Image (cartoon, helix red, strand yellow):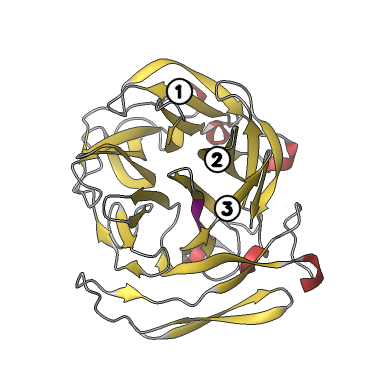
Amino acid sequence: MVSATLFVTLLGTITSIAFAAPAPAKSHSTTIAVKTVAAAKATTSAKVTTSAQFNLTTTSVYQATNFSFPDPGLLYTDSDDTWWAYSTSSSHGLVPMVKSADFKTWSKPTNVLSSVGSWATGAVWAPDVRRINAGHFVMYYTARRKTGPSNDHCIGIATACSADGPFTPQTQPLICDLANGGVIDASGFEAPNGELYIVWKVDGNSVGKSTPVKLQRLGANGYDLLGSPITLISNDSSDGGLTEAPSLVHRDGWYYLFYSTHNYNTLGYDVKYAVSKKLNAPFKKVSSFLSSGTFGTAGPGGATAINVGNKYINMVFHSDINGKSAGKGRAMWSLSNVCFNDGIATAC
């Protein structure tokens, strides 16, 4: 790779992020070294104008990749103290995967899914991997059915014995809801009592309908559907026509649902959040969490947040590489230490 320097505007000044030429790591994979972007606590409107609006803190934000890695899913395995991220299909594979020992420097991408499954065709969107138990990992992903219109997207599952894969897809999709536009952007969630859930977007905007975010309980294997789905949120006039990319975490008695709104190919794409004291109940929309300009990002979205041992919560998301649209790809960014206080989420 050729060394490059990316400049981002933050707090009214120019901060340099230098991509060092990769060098072999101990795992014999190529790594990408990235300097920290000084992080700041944004106002609830998430607008960046002058440094007077911010208090510098210890939160760290990194542009984690210098290549496209959109819609990143995030996994942490405590047995080997490793972070794993998985992305939408790209030139790096059907489901590219990168990993890190420090949440800062990430490995060269490798493909972990060899087939989209016999029911599907084309690319994979927004994969999310969860460790169900030792030796059992489940990937939730979006793909298009082989038959039907191009907007017939369903959620599929694939399983593996390791976070490294390879993942083997099942022969049938898990959820489709074709009458309402299909489904996309699945994410797993483990409740404080150990129950497993899946959350996803109904892709109603593809057929002129609403885009509710749904939740449904799963069996102990991580993919048997139990009961019926419920709606957590749906799009309103402030969401630019859609809500998508849900990610759910629990902290100190509150459930926090992160999600994106507006068109992914514009600077209006963002990350917002909603909250509830109960899981199986409608969530209340609170505020924007990331928007263009926050930490020097452009069209940030597709976020995944995970709770690590109920000690801290980290997040990954993507941001437009060219600073104006998704046309040149969307790099993965990492945000360490998301803070939560009585229903309010901040980068602290």
Return the residue at label 2: 244
Does the image show residue 104?
Answer: yes
Residue at 64 percent of width and 58 percent of height: 348
- Point out the tag, 1 or 2, that comes first from the N-terminus: 1
**Residue 281, x across and y down, in percent:** 60, 21
Contact flag, marks 3 and 2 (Cβ < 8 Å): no
Q: Which disc number belongs to residue 236? A: none
Dot 2 amino acid type? Glu
The region drawn magenta spans 313-317
Q: Secondary structure at mark 3?
A: strand
Q: Which disc number belongs to residue 338? A: 3
- Residue 314 covered by magenta stretch: yes
Q: Nearer the viewer, residue 312 or 203?
A: 312
Q: Is residue 4 left or right of residue 348?
A: left
Q: Residues within 10 Å of mark 1 (few under 14, many from 20)?
A: some
Contact flag, marks 1 and 2 (Cβ < 8 Å): no
Q: On screen, 160 above or below 22? A: above
Dot 3 amino acid type? Val
Return the residue at label 1: 216
Q: Residues within 10 Å of mark 3 (few under 14, many from 20)?
A: some
Dot 1 amino acid type? Gln
Residue at 25 percent of width and 75 percent of height: 25
- Point out the tag, 3 or 1, that comes first from the N-terminus: 1
- Residue 292 covered by magenta stretch: no
